Amino acid sequence: MSGDVELTLRGPRGYAIAREALESMEASKVAPTALNFELWLHYVAAKDSDVAAEINTVIESGEHFTDQVGAEIAAQHLPAAKLSGEILNAGKSLTKELHEVSRAIESARETSEIYGQQLATASESLDVQGDAAVRNMVETLSSATRKVREENQALEGRLHDTTQELARMREHLEQVRRDAMTDGLTGLANRKAFDETLERACASADDKAESLTLAVVDIDHFKMFNDTWGHQTGDQVIRYVASVIGRVGGQGVRFAARYGGEEFAVIFPGERSDVALAALEEAREEISSRTLKRRSTNEDLGAITISAGVAERLPSETPTALIERADEALYVSKHAGRNRTSKAAAPAKPKAA
């Protein structure tokens, strides 16, 4: 499921959207399978998405929305389904290649066995036969030797081709994996990649007893941009902010991601909160100092500002707890007037009895 839709479903309208999706499925006589339900959640929660456009096309055409139709839409537009399909196809190709190599190896083995039998027979015959028989035997052995050589050459060629094919498949699957972990709009890592990276970063911080800081960033008044200028201009704003956040998160071992919608996150492994705070302040000042123009009309969009929250991880703190504290710091920035960066306060110590 895309990060934007998942973020919407976790919000206050989540259950209402789920009910609307089921009602819409029932009205369209769509089987309530897990895959169809996921597609319909996109249809209801993100009406301007590619998934919604595909579903509308099917509905308007009068075509019945079958499981096959749903599977095709999912394979085209849902990252998880696309990744599964790519892996399945790669697995089939790999199985075919290994089967062909196994057959070639078996054929070479059988040829070698026959060659061995011929050598044994030749050894016995040489003791009792004359010159003519020896010549015939030499010709037989020469023929068998050529066949073995040809079989081995064919096997070497097949193994070379298979090695190259496996290298291509590995490269392809790696690209698919990167695509599945990348946000298509901004080119930053997506929510799935962020979750996995933060989990590893927390474990590494515990193992090495190092600092770890998390920053969450939100574009101020973003809904106003979408409502006023439309989604394409909203996407332009997101891409611009992402380019600045990406530079901050691209230094050293830092990690920047689109957290969802107009939100971003930056992981600072081995760095204290004051370093992260300074980096986010530089990004905030850069973003607010530039006036964007609408590409289609060259109209001024006004100043773009961001709010951010920074939290330094506590010993053994879970990723979820760290995110919650960074979010709390972000809310402090929002409530204080936006266009600022706030640092999470240390948890209050329990009072002595």
Image (tube, helix red, strand yellow):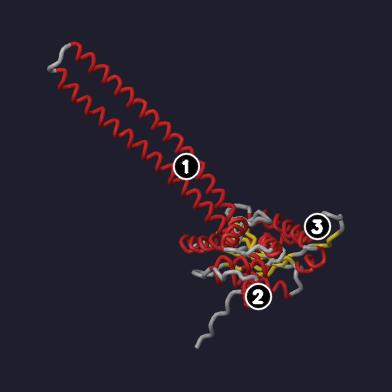
Residue 65, image x, y percentages: 62, 64
| Label drawn at residue 20 | 2
Callout 1: SS: helix
- The three-letter code of the residue at mark 3 reads Arg
Q: Marks 1 and 3: CB-CB under 8 Å?
A: no
Furthest residue toward top: 131
Spatial separation of the CA atoms under disc 2 and disc 1: 46 Å
Q: Which residue is mark 3?
A: 290
| Nearest to the observer: residue 339 or residue 20 | 20
Bin the neighbour count of mark 1 within 10 Å (Cα to Cα): few under 14, some 14-19, many 20 and up: some
Choose the circle earlier in sequence order: 2 or 3. Answer: 2
Residue 296, image x, y percentages: 83, 54
Residue placed at 22% from the left, 25% from the top?
Answer: 118
Instruction: Please indicate whether residue 241 sits to the left or right of residue 15 in the image.
Output: right
Bin the neighbour count of mark 2 within 10 Å (Cα to Cα): few under 14, some 14-19, many 20 and up: some
Q: Which residue is mark 1?
A: 166
- The three-letter code of the residue at mark 2 reads Glu
Residue 292, image x, y percentages: 81, 57
The reply to whether residue 69 is visible in this rendering is yes
